[in-house]
Amino acid sequence: MKKAKSHSTAKYSVAIVCFFFMAVLLPALSFAQTRGKVEVVKDPLIDTFIARRPMLNKAILNIGEETVYGYRVQIFFGSSRQAAYDAQEKFRQEYPDLRTYVSYTEPNFKVQAGDFRTRLEAEKLRNELTQSFTTLFIISGKINPPKADTSND
């Protein structure tokens, strides 16, 4: 008999909690949803900037060249800045028409040459440079493609 009594009191206490929640908490939550007025204070230059944004985006896109993935030949890797620039100058004297890039990733300098779309083109240059430079690697990554010839000859 005691089990039946405790079971009925448990049901009774659950019913009281549900009633309390519905009677007290739900109306309190509904009052928290009142509407208000929002006032935006901003600088008038923001509207000017938003109006000029499409023109600025076009100007930025035209400044930089399109980049694609390809290959470069790394001709120098070391910690000496002067040695990196000497290697770059040595390469430029032999191949003045190819671009070179010097980058610094602490603590080393890298000199990379060329913008090749295929690995085969980069291999060809690497084979030509084996006599002039000691450590040569082919690096894949973003390159600057050569400008298209637009003349109608």
Image (cartoon, helix red, strand yellow):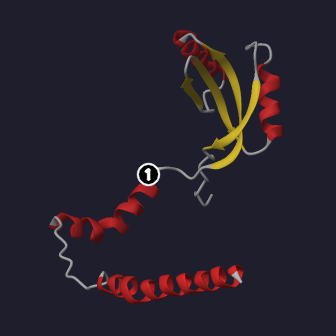
Identify which residue is drawn at 64% across, 20% down: 91
Identify which residue is drawn at 33% across, 83% down: 28
x then y, percent, for residue 14: 55, 82
Near-viewer residue (96 or 85) = 85
Using residue 140 as the reference point, say whether residue 90 is left or right of it: left
Identify which residue is drawn at 64% across, 84% down: 5
Locate residue 80: give its quadrant: top right
x then y, percent, for residue 19: 46, 89
- Quadrant containing the C terminus in the rendered view: bottom right
x then y, percent, for residue 113: 65, 29
Q: Is residue 116 above or below residue 84?
A: below
Q: Amino acid at mark 1?
A: Ile
Helix, strand or loop status at disc 1: helix
- Quadrant containing the N terminus in the rendered view: bottom right
Near-viewer residue (53 or 120) = 53
Mark 1, Cα crowd under 10 Å, few <14 / some 14-19 / many 20+, is few
Q: Is residue 43 above or below residue 98?
A: below
Number of marks in the rendered image: 1
Using residue 20 as the reference point, say whether residue 40 is left or right of it: left
x then y, percent, for residue 100: 59, 29
Locate residue 97: give its quadrant: top right
Q: Is residue 151 above or below residue 72?
A: below
Q: Which residue is mark 1?
A: 63
Using residue 144 as the reference point, say whether residue 133 is left or right of it: right
Check the image and name the residue furthest to the front: 1
